[in-house]
Amino acid sequence: MPPRSVVKKFLARPQHEGLGAVVRRSIGRFELRYFDPFLVLDEFSVSAPAGFPDHPHRGFETVTYMLQGAVTHEDFEGHKGTIEAGDLQWMTAGRGIVHSEMPAAEGTQKGLQLWINLSSKHKMIQPRYQEISSEDIVEAAKDGIKVRIIAGESLGEKSAIYTRTPTMYLDFTLKPGSHLQQPIPKSYNTFVYVLEGEGIFGPHESATTTAHNLLLLGGSGDGLEAWNKTTKTLRFILVGGEPLGEPVEQLGPFVMNTQQEIDQTVEDFDNYTNGFEKAKHWRSQARIRLDY
């Protein structure tokens, strides 16, 4: 069977988000509001004092993967930590979390944040975290290809990350002249996001794609084929997930199934109830510093 082909291509242009941060948003923009089960993909760039101060989430997961620098995270449950280049944080917001994400190093901090929807039966679960340092992310290499396996499996190796919504998330680096064949579960919606260099994705005669482009892959085909025919390194992520097939109602950082559930979420947040109780008296250290 031939490989999956590219059915849509988007260039993620810079836009401002949070407090002075710059993001390249490819999923969650007007041309592509939702790619079931994915809600948002941002390639972010932030330098102090800019950042993402105290803000809430409900109903989905955020996956933060650092490419450069470091970001400190803290929330109203008392969880606090810093993720550095190559580190991963997989946060299940569930019924509710309020947190901040702020630069923790000099210069520019860069990374990816992916929002993954949760099914209706999981939207109100207790929040949880999976944090993996760079040295603990499973890696494999073969024939000029290196892969960091954030979720799923590749080249005979498998990630230990638990994905409540079945997900694959692979960070590939292809040396000049290398050729990748990566299986994809048949039911998954799948995309490629190019971080560095340029490559050919899908059938051999496909056009070359450069950095900051998102490629949506078609549903039929036997996985992904990619070629690096240049003299420079090609780096991209391949992400796929099991579609939920459920209605989506979103109001900013709240993602539920019905407008009634969104209205209830706003009421819960405004009244500090039903999962947001601790938000009433909590401010992050970053927020306190900004206020002064």
Image (tube, rainbow, N blue to C red):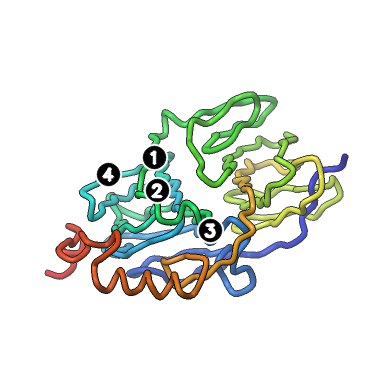
Residue at 40% across / 44% down in the picture? Answer: 89
Q: Where is residue 208 in the image (x, y as percent from the top left)?
A: 75, 53
The alpha-carbon separation of the residues under discs 1 and 4 comes to: 12 Å
Q: Which amino acid does label 2 sit on?
A: Met
The 10 Å Cα crowd at callout 4, few under 14, some 14 to 19, many 20 or more, is few
Q: Name the residue under label 2.
A: 91
Please tell me the numbered disc located at residue 130.
1
Judged from the image, the secondary structure of the residue bearing numbered disc 4 is strand
Q: Can residue 126 be seen in this view?
A: yes
Q: Mark 3 points at which residue?
A: 41
Closer to the eye: label 2 or 4: 2
Q: Nearer the viewer, residue 253 or 144?
A: 253
The alpha-carbon separation of the residues under discs 3 and 4 comes to: 22 Å
**Is tag 3's residue or tag 1's residue first in the polypeptide sequence?**
3
Left or right for 174, reference 287? right
The alpha-carbon separation of the residues under discs 3 and 1 comes to: 19 Å
The 10 Å Cα crowd at callout 1, few under 14, some 14 to 19, many 20 or more, is few
Question: What is the quadrant of residue 83 in the picture?
Answer: top left
The 10 Å Cα crowd at callout 3, few under 14, some 14 to 19, many 20 or more, is many
**Is tag 2's residue or tag 4's residue first in the polypeptide sequence?**
4
* Disc 1 + disc 2, Cβ < 8 Å: yes
Q: Is residue 226 visible?
A: no
Residue at 72% across / 43% down in the picture? Answer: 230
Q: Nearer the viewer, residue 245 or 208?
A: 245
Q: What residue type is labelled 1?
A: Gln
Q: Mark 4 points at which residue?
A: 81
Question: What is the quadrant of residue 210 in the picture?
Answer: bottom right
Q: Which amino acid does label 3 sit on?
A: Leu
